[in-house]
């Protein structure tokens, strides 16, 4: 499968082009993270009948920049008894894990940084890197709260990979490809061709729609757990663990954790948008369809998912550790198996 | 209880080292500067030792150097969340000691003030309990409403938190015009928010999972530890000084004592204690409505304030229903204008003592919730 | 098994109910008061910084005695008959006591309003001023005296001179008490 990438088309596949291709998602992550932080601040404020930040710039839109500047200026404290190499390495590993997944995200019809055939598999593989960073940071901080946070976090990440993987596997069965660009192309046309509505097909697909919707829900819930968002923010549950694995981090290293969290949020939202919500496809067939519009649709779909994540965060209380495991292993996993079976049956009958 | 036993059984078969962690004094959810020395085995709490004294301000010793009216600002600072309710037993004790008959209007204003402050206190209690469970939004809904209550209290007394409003034999000031309308609006607003929070938090499935069957306090244990207030009532014991040892004019109002029912879990769990507070807000609303309707318009609130406060030699103990439980003051007078001794029975201090008993065998995250459901104020624990 | 599905259902439905409530709150009018731009109107009784009317103050020190935290520090000097500088109080009577020092330490003040109640001449009161944060704690020590330091020294010297004469004339008497203070004490009682 050849690369579909407008930068390579324009410049040829040379060194500068590769650097450009690499840095474009990085630019996007930075800008997006600022926007997401602002969204988080504002949505939480509006839900709680507050105004949120209002002083930095008009309506406080420069607040995330101010916060980043503040974090850069802050003193970078390393605890005395910490394991310094690991302590310093952990935030970078987490951010690398989050950033590496951007390689296969199809932003548009003509831009995917690396169109590899095992795209979905790759996302899952690099997504697990952050678990190493978490446990590294938590252990190296030499803080009991951090250690507990790290332990919980790894347990949570591992248990919720499985329902998430089952949900995605079902779609892989349905689409019979793991290439994210291919999956997007399959969903072109009207919005009922999206995999959340059973993918392209005749009216006979109607009985599989509840299962695909269920799969998208399962993936969404698991993704909340993977990104440590409420109601699964147990690793950093502030009421008992202060701040979990990043209790001891300050300044720029804390900012790296922060960025990684928001980057992860975008990745899971992007995967959800790609495999369930049609990616860069317009919901209305050829209306507003095209490479630039594709990027618009993709980013707005992903942002809607991020908005729902934020919305949920300010609505729900937090689970307890054992309940989290219960939900992961005894609720999501069996249901995802059932859905997987149903989808497989559908594919066999087709 | 079965959940706890099952967990005990499962974890007793694992070989593991225990870890001691200090929760507090600087911890986001110890509700102040409390330090809990917790021994955990994995996630299971095996031992809790509360360490007190980080907020000790030697209130009782101070009182010996103060004249009687000067003590009232210090009493505000015992339980700074419900200062009106704090002042009440003290001024009642002094009135009993000096034999002062207070005007009827004063009683009505005191009831309204105390009930408004009770609502404000319970709002903080329920809000921070939700915060401990991870729900942030109800916290700010409650704080918005509490702000409206505080505006009324500020208009009445001049201060937002530490009112110094009750005087021995009267009050610092009369009601302002429009007081009754403000109170009735608050009652409406409190009911609206409570209905909303019921859906958003109290009956949320995750919240029920977190709080039901957690921190079960059986009624006999609660009585043995001398718990009072919503902590005791959450265990199903119908005990409220406003009814059982009626003081002031509470016998003129029609209200119920909400008790824990074990609606979603076991009787006496965290959810029940929290629910008792929510129901008590409604009862306070009822009392305020009745008091507003019956309150006389005429009357001088300062007519019974003695010019010189020099009680006769003697001693007196008076207690009243604080939002957190029984708050009592024991005053020994030696005939001068300064007391020989003032002893306060801090509700939070007594209620806190039950923590080691009820938090063993639960998860570490539950410990925070149990602490939140007890609703302590460290100013009252340490005094 | 039924309970299992019931739990899942109630989890999802209560989440939906909660999300519905929070979504409604997205669009209601916000309650924030943007503080330095919009100001909350303080009620008339609000207990803010104390203000002192030095014309009314007689120097009776009732406020200092009523203060539970001893944040009011007053030094009074008896007015000498031979002092060329004489003042009238707001009541029209002659001032009996000079206020050599009237300091209120707002770092100590607990805003309990007991001094306002105690004042017999309505001289001390709460002002509407509540924005007076400072960088140094010493800056919270407010000096209300109207006399200059030289005047205070002059008046202290006059009093010392008088006391010395008094001591020579009546060596057996106890040191004379300021007359004016005694009068006011009797009045309040």
Image: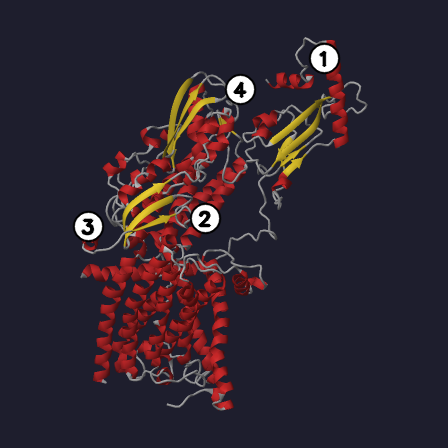
Q: Is residue B316 visible?
A: yes
Please tell me which residue lies in front, B111 or B45. Answer: B45
The CA distance from mark 2 to mark 3 is 38 Å
Q: Residues within 10 Å of mark 4 (few under 14, many from 20)?
A: few
Residue on which disc 1 sits: C167
Could you tell me if the residues under marks 2 and 4 are in contact, i.e. CB atoms within 8 Å? no
Q: Which chain does the residue under circle 4 lie in?
A: B
The CA distance from mark 4 to mark 3 is 62 Å
The answer to which of marks 2 and 3 sits earlier in the sequence is 3
Could you tell me if the residues under marks 4 and 1 are in contact, i.e. CB atoms within 8 Å? no
Q: Which mark is drawn over residue B143?
A: 2
Of circles 2 and 3, which is in front? 3
Of circles 2 and 4, which is in front? 4
Q: Which chain does the residue under circle 1 lie in?
A: C
The CA distance from mark 2 to mark 1 is 66 Å
Q: Quadrant of residue A73?
A: bottom right
Q: Are marks 4 and 3 on the same chain?
A: yes
Picture coordinates of residue B242 (x, y %)?
35, 32
Q: Give the left or right position of residue C188, taking residue B153 as reference.
A: right
The answer to which of marks 4 and 3 sits earlier in the sequence is 3
Q: Give the left or right position of residue A39, taking residue C98 as reference.
A: left
């Amino acid at each position: 499968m050849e690369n579909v990438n407008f930068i390579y088309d324009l410049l040829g596949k040379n060194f500068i082009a590769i650097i450009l291709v690499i840095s474009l998602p990085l630019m996007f992550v930075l800008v997006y993270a600022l926007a997401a932080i602002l969204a988080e601040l504002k949505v939480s404020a509006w839900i709680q009948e507050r105004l949120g930040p209002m002083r930095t710039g008009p309506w406080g839109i420069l607040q995330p920049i101010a916060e980043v500047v503040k974090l850069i200026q802050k003193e970078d404290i390393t605890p005395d008894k910490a394991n310094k190499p690991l302590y310093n390495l952990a935030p970078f590993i987490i951010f690398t894990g989050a950033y590496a997944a951007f390689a296969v995200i199809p932003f548009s019809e003509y831009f995917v940084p690396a169109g590899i055939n095992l795209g979905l598999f790759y996302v899952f593989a690099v997504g697990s890197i952050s678990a190493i960073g978490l446990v590294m940071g938590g252990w190296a901080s030499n803080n009991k709260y951090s250690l507990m946070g790290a332990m919980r976090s790894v347990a949570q990440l591992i248990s919720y990979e499985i329902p998430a993987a089952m949900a995605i596997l079902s779609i892989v069965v349905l689409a019979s490809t793991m290439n994210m660009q291919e999956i997007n192309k399959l969903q072109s046309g009207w919005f009922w061709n999206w995999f959340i509505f059973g993918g392209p097909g005749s009216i006979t697909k109607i009985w599989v729609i509840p299962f695909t919707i269920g799969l998208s829900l399962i993936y969404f819930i698991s993704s909340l757990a993977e990104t440590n968002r409420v109601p699964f923010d147990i690793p950093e549950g502030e009421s008992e663990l202060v701040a979990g694995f990043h209790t001891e981090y300050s300044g720029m290293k804390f900012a790296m954790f922060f960025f990684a969290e928001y980057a992860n949020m975008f990745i899971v939202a992007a995967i959800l948008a790609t495999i369930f919500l049609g990616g860069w496809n317009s919901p209305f067939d050829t209306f507003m369809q095209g490479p630039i519009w594709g990027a618009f649709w993709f980013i707005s779909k992903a942002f809607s998912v991020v908005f729902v994540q934020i919305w949920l965060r300010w609505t729900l209380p937090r689970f307890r550790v054992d309940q989290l495991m219960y939900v992961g292993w005894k609720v999501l996993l069996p249901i995802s198996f059932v859905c997987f079976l149903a989808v497989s049956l559908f594919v066999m009958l087709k | 209880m079965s959940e706890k036993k099952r967990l005990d059984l499962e974890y007793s078969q694992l070989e593991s080292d225990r870890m001691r962690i200090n929760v507090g004094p600087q911890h986001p959810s110890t509700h102040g500067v409390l330090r809990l020395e917790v021994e955990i085995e994995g996630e299971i709490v095996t031992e809790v030792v509360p360490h007190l004294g980080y907020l000790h301000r030697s209130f009782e010793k101070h009182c010996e150097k103060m004249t009687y009216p000067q003590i009232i600002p210090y009493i505000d600072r015992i339980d700074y969340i419900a200062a009106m309710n704090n002042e009440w037993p003290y001024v009642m004790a002094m009135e009993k000691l000096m034999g002062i008959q207070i005007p009827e209007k004063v009683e009505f204003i005191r009831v309204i003030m105390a009930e408004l402050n009770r609502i404000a206190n319970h709002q903080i209690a329920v809000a921070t309990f939700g915060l401990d469970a991870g729900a942030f939004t109800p916290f700010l809904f409650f704080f918005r409403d509490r702000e409206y209550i505080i505006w009324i209290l500020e208009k009445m007394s001049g201060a937002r938190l530490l009112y110094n409003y009750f005087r021995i034999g009267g009050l610092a000031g009369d009601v302002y015009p429009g007081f009754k309308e403000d109170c009735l609006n608050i009652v409406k607003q409190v009911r609206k928010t409570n209905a909303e929070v019921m859906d958003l938090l109290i009956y949320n499935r995750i919240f029920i999972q977190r709080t039901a069957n957690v921190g079960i306090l059986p009624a006999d244990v609660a009585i043995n530890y001398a718990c009072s207030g919503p902590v005791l009532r959450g265990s199903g014991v119908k005990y409220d000084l406003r009814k059982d040892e009626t003081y002031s004019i509470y016998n003129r109002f029609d209200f119920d004592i909400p008790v824990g029912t074990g609606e979603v879990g076991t009787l006496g769990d965290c959810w029940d204690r929290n629910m008792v507070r929510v129901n008590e807000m409604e009862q306070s609303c009822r009392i305020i409505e009745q008091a507003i309707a019956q309150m006389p318009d005429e009357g001088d609130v300062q007519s019974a304030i003695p010019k010189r406060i020099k009680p006769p030699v003697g001693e007196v103990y008076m207690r009243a229903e604080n939002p957190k439980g029984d708050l009592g003051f024991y005053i020994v007078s030696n005939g001068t204008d300064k007391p020989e001794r003032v002893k306060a029975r801090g509700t939070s201090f007594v209620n806190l003592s039950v923590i080691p008993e009820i938090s063993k065998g639960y998860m570490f995250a539950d410990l925070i919730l149990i602490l939140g459901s007890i609703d302590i104020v460290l100013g009252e624990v340490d005094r | 098994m039924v309970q299992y599905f019931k739990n899942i259902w109630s989890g999802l439905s209560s989440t939906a109910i909660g999300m519905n409530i929070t979504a409604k709150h997205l669009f209601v009018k916000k309650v924030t008061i943007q503080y330095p731009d919009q100001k909350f109107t303080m009620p008339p009784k609000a207990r803010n910084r104390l203000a002192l009317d030095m014309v009314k103050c007689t120097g009776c020190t009732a406020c200092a005695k009523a203060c539970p935290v001893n944040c009011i520090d007053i030094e009074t000097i008896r007015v000498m008959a031979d002092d060329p500088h004489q003042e009238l109080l707001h009541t029209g009577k002659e001032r009996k006591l000079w206020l050599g020092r009237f300091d209120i330490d707002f770092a100590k003040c607990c805003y309990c309003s007991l001094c306002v109640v105690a004042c017999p001449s309505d001289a001390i009161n709460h002002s509407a001023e509540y924005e007076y944060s400072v960088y140094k704690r010493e800056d919270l020590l407010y000096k209300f005296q109207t006399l200059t330091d030289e005047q205070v020294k002059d008046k202290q010297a006059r009093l010392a001179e008088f006391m010395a004469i008094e001591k020579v004339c009546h060596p057996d008497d106890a040191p004379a008490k300021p007359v004016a203070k005694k009068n006011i004490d009797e009045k309040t009682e």
